Image (spheres, grey):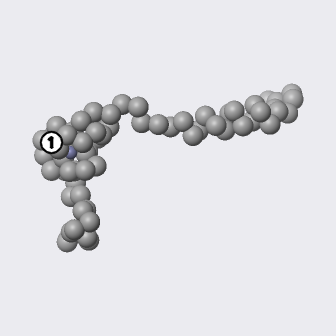
């Protein structure tokens, strides 16, 4: 069984763990429908449009629960 020869220091352990927290969204593009920034190739989180079509019914504070 492969085993680490030496215990990693707290510093190395914490540096390794810190890599998980840098999952940031770097690429943002304005939505072609509403102009809000969002990830490319994703349904817009503001208006729910993708590829010029309404893909997801977005709940707004005024509407509350979406009717089924
Ligand atoms: Zn949009």
Which residue appears farthest toward the right when viewing the image?
6
Q: Quadrant of the C terminus?
A: bottom left
Rendered location of residue 59, percent (x, y): 25, 62
Instruction: Determine the residue positioned at 24% across, 42% down.
Output: 36
For this rendering, which residue is in front, 68 or 32? Answer: 32
Rendered location of residue 39, percent (x, y): 32, 37
- Tell me which image quadrant ligand 1 sits in: top left
Instruction: Determine the residue positioned at 28% across, 39% down.
Output: 37
Disc 1: which residue: 33
Q: Quadrant of the N terminus?
A: top right
Q: Please determine whether, in this image, residue 22 is positioned above or below residue 64.
A: above
Decide if residue 32 is on the left or right side of residue 25: left
Residue 22 position by quadrant? top right
Label 1 neighbourhood size at 10 Å, few (<14), some (14-19), many (20+)? some
Which residue appears farthest toward the left when viewing the image?
52
For this rendering, which residue is in front, 66 or 2? Answer: 66
Q: Using the rendered image of the protein, determine whether residue 28 is visible from the camera's viewpoint.
A: yes
Decide if residue 15 is on the left or right side of residue 45: right
Rendered location of residue 44, percent (x, y): 25, 45
Residue 6 position by quadrant? top right
Rendered location of residue 46, percent (x, y): 25, 50
Q: Please determine whether, in this image, residue 66 is positioned above or below residue 58.
A: below
Total of numbered circles in the picture?
1
Element on which disc 1 rests: loop
In the image, the residue with mark 1 has its CB under 8 Å from the nearest atom of ligand 1? yes
Instruction: Determine the residue positioned at 72% across, 37% down.
Output: 14
Q: Please determine whether, in this image, residue 50 is positioned above or below residue 59.
A: above
Instruction: Determine the residue positioned at 15% across, 50% down.
Output: 54
Q: Using the rendered image of the protein, determine whether residue 1 is visible from the camera's viewpoint.
A: no
């Amino acid at each position: 069984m492969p085993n680490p020869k030496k215990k990693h220091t707290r510093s190395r352990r914490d540096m390794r763990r810190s890599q998980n927290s840098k999952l940031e969204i770097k690429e943002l593009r304005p939505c072609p429908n509403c102009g809000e920034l969002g990830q490319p190739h994703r349904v817009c989180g503001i208006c729910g449009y993708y590829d010029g079509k309404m893909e997801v019914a977005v709940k707004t504070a005024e509407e509350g629960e979406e009717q089924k």
